[in-house]
Image (spheres, rainbow, N blue to C red):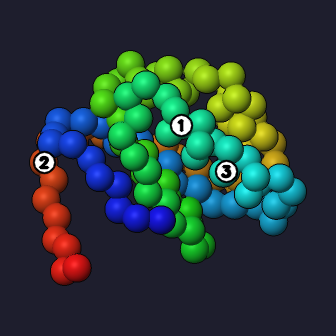
Amino acid sequence: MTIAATPAPPYYAVIFTSIRTDGDEGYGAMADAMMESAARQPGFLGVESAREEVGITVSYWASLDAISSWKQDAAHLVAQKLGRDNWYAAYKTRICRVERDYDFNAV
């Protein structure tokens, strides 16, 4: 995983924060499939993800319409239901407009 190469602002970020259940059957495969599917969606700009006790995935999008389309994608709807039923004890989704960004790269 690398830091997403996003364009100059403004753009949007979807921050998905989660606490997992003990159940893991199929989670990894579905997570990989959703990352690949999101990357094919119009307006997708990139993604970053980390998991310890709390998982955080931030996906970046060109517009609110692109985010809405991804939320309603048929495969994503299946993943959302499986997440609620099997994989997540709790989650929160936040949608933000990125107004400014800056970076540092020592490499």
- How packed mark 1 is, by other alpha carbons closer than 10 Å (few <14, some 14-19, many 20 or more), is many
Between marks 2 and 1 in the image, the one whose residue lies nearer the viewer: 1
Q: Position of residue 36 (x, y in %)?
A: 59, 43
Q: Amino acid at mark 1?
A: Ala
Q: Is residue 90 above or below residue 68?
A: below
Q: Position of residue 86 (x, y in %)?
A: 81, 49
Q: Position of residue 78 (x, y in %)?
A: 75, 31
Q: Earlier in the sequence, mark 3 or mark 2?
A: 3
Q: Earlier in the sequence, mark 3 or mark 1?
A: 3
Marks 3 and 1 sit apart, C-alpha to C-alpha, by 10 Å
- How packed mark 3 is, by other alpha carbons closer than 10 Å (few <14, some 14-19, many 20 or more), is few
Q: Mark 2 highlights which residue?
A: 100
Taking the image as shown, residue 32 lies to the left or right of residue 42, namely right
Element on which disc 3 rests: helix
Residue at image coords 84%, 60%: 23
Marks 2 and 1 sit apart, C-alpha to C-alpha, by 23 Å
Disc sitting over residue 38 in the figure: 1
Element on which disc 2 rests: loop
> Residue 69 or 93: which is nearer the viewer?
69
